[in-house]
Amino acid sequence: MSAMVRPRDGRMIGGVCAGLARRFGMTPRMMRALFLVSCLLPGPQFLVYIALWVLLPNERADFSAKAAW
């Protein structure tokens, strides 16, 4: 499993579902579907999503491999 970060690629809104999918070895599409299904249940799903959006760091860019010019 990889670290909990919000990836730079594959984001839809904040990258939370893409980051969770990468962490747990799922596809981002499956994680988004699970999130949408969970929204049908009572609970603080949107608050948890917003909290993860704020708390999860962005994936660091590898500037050493890419030239600025």
Image (cartoon, grey):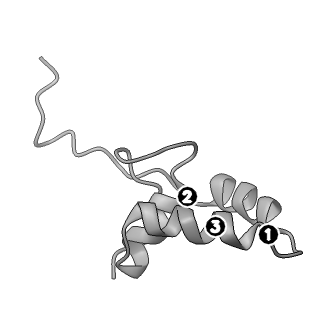
Question: For numbered disc 3, what is the local secondary structure?
Answer: helix
Using the image, tell me which numbered label, if any, was put on residue 35: 3
Q: Amino acid at mark 1?
A: Leu
Q: Are marks 2 and 1 in contact (CB under 8 Å)?
A: no
Q: Is residue 35 visible?
A: yes
Q: Tag 3: Cα neighbours inside 10 Å, few (<14), some, or many (≥20)?
A: some
Dot 2 or dot 1: first in sequence order is 2
Q: Are marks 2 and 3 in contact (CB under 8 Å)?
A: no
Task: Decide: is 51 above or below 4.
Answer: above
Q: Quadrant of the C terminus?
A: top left
Residue designated by label 2: 16
Q: Tag 1: Cα neighbours inside 10 Å, few (<14), some, or many (≥20)?
A: few
Q: Amino acid at mark 3?
A: Phe
- Could you give the CA–CA distance between mark 1 and mark 3, rounded to whole angstroms? 9 Å
Left or right position of 65 against 39: left
Could you say where residue 21 lies in the image, as x and y percent from the top left? 43, 70
Dot 2 or dot 3: first in sequence order is 2
Q: Residue at x 21, y 39 (%)?
A: 63
Residue 13, quarter of picture:
top right
Residue designated by label 1: 40
Q: Amino acid at mark 2?
A: Val
Left or right position of 4 against 26: right
